[in-house]
Image (cartoon, rainbow, N blue to C red):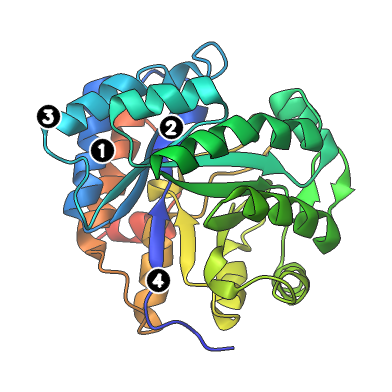
Amino acid sequence: MTTPKSVKLVEVGPRDGLQNESAPVTTAEKIHLIESLIDAGVSYIEAGSFVNPRSVPQMADSDQVFAGLKKLRRLNLPALTLAALTPNLKGFERAMEAGVSEVAVFASASEGFSAKNINCTIAESLTRFEPVMQAALDQGVAVRGYISCVVGCPYDGEVTPQQVDLVSRALFDMGCYEVSLGDTIGVGTAGHFKRLLDYLLLKNSVDKLAVHCHDTYGQALANICVSLEYGIATVDASVAGLGGCPYALNASGNVASEDVVYMLEGMNISTGIDLDKLVAVGQSISTLLGKPTNSNIGRARSTR
């Protein structure tokens, strides 16, 4: 196992972060957030979600967000990926019309969370993805997979590595090029992630796995460190620590992108991201939302 020399940061703030915000964020404000992240050097951004707007009102304007980014010539650039969540074929078709170049699907490792989150079993959710995966294959569109609750579930309790492996195998078999392991409620520890990766890496290549850590119990950076030691080189994060989980009481947002980049810089691991600019983006979106940043680095820098 070798710690990577560089890490790809997958910025999920504009989607996974904002979708949990009750106060409406305008299309122009979302485009400005994404533009600012690009200016800071972020090369992979999950910019929207093509879900039922009644389910996630904050993402109802994803078509317009991508249209605005297209006008700014931000789509289809070789060094930039602007992705979107597409949980079904209708969402995928909307994403293609909007000019999205890469999409994502998500499943849960826990039956309880799957039932509460998307109102179906794990097996049923995977079946729903089959038309999406086939359409993506036909059109040459890359698909990233997410797995929720890889360590624990607010309804079912502990989740075993074997449960995660079953879902990851299904996603890979369908054609996902990468699977992101989500500690959705932030209960994982370094020990949990060691056991999880020990098991998953018996059957999977490390370059096909990513981590997505929430920081509810303050363990996210430690869990990322362990993952880096196993060779994981893709880390999901959210500027200003935006996000949460509406189906998990008191679950905090994703680990803050600023904190991840600061830690990686201290480890001499390259991200290509300008930390000062990223901190400024986090402070700007936090001010817009009328709430303090969840980034430790952001808070420290704001007191200077």
Task: First in sequence, mark 2 or 1: give its number.
Answer: 2
Using residue 185 as the reference point, say whether residue 55 is left or right of it. Answer: left
Residue that extends furthest to the top in the rendered view of this protein: 54
Q: Is residue 214 visible?
A: yes
Identity of the residue drawn at 41% across and 55% down: 10
Q: Are marks 2 and 4 in contact (CB under 8 Å)?
A: no
Q: Nearer the viewer, mark 3 or mark 2?
A: 3
Q: Are marks 1 and 4 in contact (CB under 8 Å)?
A: no
Disc 3 to disc 2, C-alpha distance: 22 Å
Q: Which residue in the structure is indicated by mark 4? A: 7
Please name the amino acid that badge 2 sits on: Leu
Q: Position of residue 294 (x, y in %)?
A: 45, 48
Disc 3 to disc 1, C-alpha distance: 16 Å
Q: Nearer the viewer, mark 3 or mark 1?
A: 3
Task: First in sequence, mark 3 or 2: give its number.
Answer: 2
Please name the amino acid that badge 3 sits on: Lys
Residue that extends furthest to the left in the rendered view of this protein: 72
Label ID, residue 33: 1
Label ID, residue 71: 3
Using residue 139 as the reference point, say whether residue 221 is left or right of it. Answer: right
Residue in front for this viewpoint, 38 or 70: 70
Using residue 161 as the reference point, say whether residue 42 is left or right of it. Answer: left
Please name the amino acid that badge 1 sits on: Leu
Q: In what element is the residue under mark 2?
A: helix
Task: First in sequence, mark 3 or 4: give its number.
Answer: 4
Q: Which residue in the structure is indicated by mark 2? A: 18
Q: Nearer the viewer, mark 3 or mark 4?
A: 3
Q: Position of residue 184 (x, y in %)?
A: 66, 47
Height in image: 210 above or below 286? below
